[in-house]
Image (cartoon, rainbow, N blue to C red):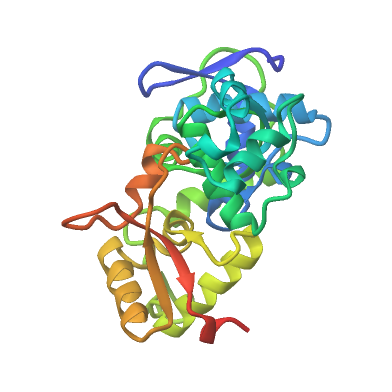
Amino acid sequence: MNKREVTTINMEAIELEVSQLKFLLKLLSKPDYRASITEAKPNSKTSASERDQICKALCEHKLIESTTEITKIQITEKGKEHLNQDQADSQLSTKERKIIKACETEPTTPAKTNVKPAKTRKEIMAKLIDDKYIEVAETKYKDVWITEKGIKYLLNSYQPVGRGNINLSKTMLADYIDFMRKHLPHSTTTISESDGNSATTANPPTNEEILKIIKDLDQELGTENYLPLFHLRQKLQPPLSREELDQALYSLQRENKIDLNELQEANMYTGEQIEAGIPQTTGGRLFFIELRQSMIN
């Protein structure tokens, strides 16, 4: 089977190319089925552009999700009109005008706007994009991970069709077998080979262990002490349930070790990522985890 031949997923009649299947299998070898985009390409000969096309297609099928980073912004007609106004009449802040001005003549990178810190710059850019003063000119994929739908597909729905050889490596096949075994019924217990006695898996993480995982994820992902909650859910569910993790976060908040902040600008995240936030009776979802200064080393 050549690389353009397809296999059919019996899930909403999705047709999956072999390279896309291998992309999914590559993620099975990674912790929590998550990796940076550079680690997820099907093989060493896959170009960056081919890899990104595969990623885009799988995201559209909702078999994976990804984080993206805005690498270039450009001004819109509305932004140009605003810059022609007298600054005294502007309803925008100095930093907002600075970002618009930075991409007045050509697309530019966020860093070249010289608005700091990065967290503030991201928030201002999101607002300016939402208000149509600027627009995204270029993005790049950062992290990718298999969604719940992708896991269910690999467990229950994948069935190769047609003739020919998919040419899976032994490593990919082994990862797939390990994945299937992990999700078998009653896989939360292990059987001792010596006496047949069952032993339960490790205890769920403590609050202090969760706090350390938050710190590690923030450093690993470069979220500058503003970690989106979906990253932590991806890491800890399972072994924790959604409710157990929510209660652990509330406990850490009561101990003045973290703050939980609402999502204000939703356009930078997918629906599934937003759903990972904690809903409130009033206001937006609690979406960002921020370490208190006393917890930052």
In the rendered image, residue 159, in percent from the top left (x then y), is placed at 46, 25
Q: Quick check: 140 above or below 285?
A: above
Q: Is residue 169 left or right of residue 82?
A: right
In the rendered image, residue 126, in percent from the top left (x then y), is placed at 51, 41
> Between 76 and 68, which is closer to the camera in this rendering?
76
Residue at 62% x, 53% y: name it. Answer: 30
Q: Quadrant of the N terminus?
A: top right
Residue at 58% x, 56% y: name it. Answer: 119
Residue 218 visible, this angle: yes
Q: Quick check: 105 above or below 295?
A: above
In the rendered image, residue 73, in percent from the top left (x then y), is placed at 66, 32
Q: Is residue 14 left or right of residue 215?
A: left
Question: How many numbered marks are there?
Answer: 0
> Between 247 and 228, which is closer to the camera in this rendering?
228
Residue at 35% x, 20% y: name it. Answer: 12
Q: Is residue 96 left or right of residue 152?
A: right
Residue at 32% x, 47% y: name it. Answer: 275
In the rendered image, residue 113, in percent from the top left (x then y), is placed at 72, 43
Q: Quadrant of the C terminus?
A: bottom right
Q: Quick check: 209 above or below 266?
A: below
Q: Quick check: 182 above or below 71?
A: below
Residue 177 visible, this angle: no
**Residue lying furthest left in this view?**
281
> Between 101 and 106, which is closer to the camera in this rendering?
101
